[in-house]
Amino acid sequence: MTSDQRKKLALLMLNMFIAVGSFGIIIPIIPAYLKELGQGGTAAGLIIAIFAFAQFLVSPIGGKWTDKYGRRPLINIGLLTLAISMFIFYFANSIWLLYLSRAIGGIGCAFLIPAIYAYVADITTMDQRAKGNSFISAAMSLGIVIGPGIGGFLADYGLKTPLLVSAIVGLLAFIVSYFTLKESLTEKIEIPQSENQSMIKDIVLSVKKPFFIPLIITLIMSFGLMAYETVLGLYVDDKFGATPQEIAFMVTATGLVGVIMQLFVVDWIVKTIGELNVLKLFLIVTASGFLLSIIAGSYAMFFAISLLIFLATSILRPVLTTLISKMAGNEQGFAMGMNNAYMSIGNILGPLLAGALYDIDILYPFIAGLIILLLTIIFTFMWKGAKHQKTALQEGN
């Protein structure tokens, strides 16, 4: 990559890290914050679900707008919206304001994330696309890992301190982006009035796109990963008597493995065996991890299996994004918006199903995930993706 590409990619990575970290930073203080408002588990679940649902609803719109109005405006609007959501959270004195804050935050991510990935597609060649996307995914993973740690540290200076710091950092990110980030879209796409359709129609339209199968796999991966994460702490506590420190260490370690894979492995392995082969291989690895989870007999074994699962999914995420991007042609914004929307569906449904199944039997979430992954593997091997990818590559060159 050129020096200019690296500078732009670094700024995009910073924006993604701040976006994801701004959510992670509040995780350690949510229980105490909700207690002050007289709320409990239901409110905690709604805070996560409302964020994901707002992101799901608005992502297709954000994707189309990033094609129509450019990447830079949507990135800046997304950063500003996220900062506003954190200021509302900071000043909130009722549960309804917290819900409003999370809805606004979800909207901000729906504008920001598709625009960032579309920007990466604009500034990279086909050969560089996987590397660019893996770096953005690494920034996302790092935000997930570091955000809660920063939040816990800042909470020592006051329960609301993490919220204020997150809001101020988000506002500074918007200012820096506004004055330094240049537009990458050279030719904006005029969307006919007839195509300004509802979110439901956009999802129906996505079924006809060549990148539909990767979208479905993205949904399933998000579904499985969120389901796994939802019951992870509960399972090792109930099954192996793990301490909070052991659970925290497991979550941090799996997150760091993801960052390392995305920074140093994804580009190499894609260039070595190609996106489709990586997709098939690591879907099998993920399914194997779910199978081993069912028979794990100790905390150490389950920890190792979790590392394997997160390693595989950390490679799958940028590879899927790259596949979608290469097949999207000049519809980068729409494709990335739908990618974000399908991911949000998985993020909403995964925890709901996993929690319900866990209450029936603690092994059921892993069994259900294994069955779904096996069906996905069969579907992926039957998919004529190679033909679509070859066409997309020829059109992109």
Image (cartoon, rainbow, N blue to C red):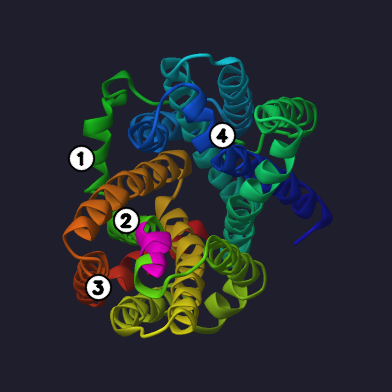
The residue where tag 2 is placed is: 223
Residue 367 horizontal side relative to residue 36, left or right: left
Spatial CA distance of label 1 from label 3 is 27 Å
Region in magenta:
231-237
The kind of secondary structure element at disc 2 is helix
- Asked whether residue 382 is in view, the answer is yes
| Three-letter code for the amino acid on which mark 1 is drawn | Val
Is residue 63 magenta-colored? no
| Three-letter code for the amino acid on which mark 4 is drawn | Glu
Spatial CA distance of label 1 from label 2 is 20 Å
Tell me which corner region of the image, top left, top right, bottom left or bottom right, holds residue 280.
bottom left
The residue where tag 1 is placed is: 204
Q: Residue at x 26, y 47 (%)?
A: 352
The residue where tag 3 is placed is: 370
Q: Position of residue 267 (x, y in %)?
A: 60, 72
The kind of secondary structure element at disc 1 is helix
Tell me if mark 3 has few (under 14), some (14-19) or many (20+) residues whose alpha carbon lies within 10 angstroms of its own: many
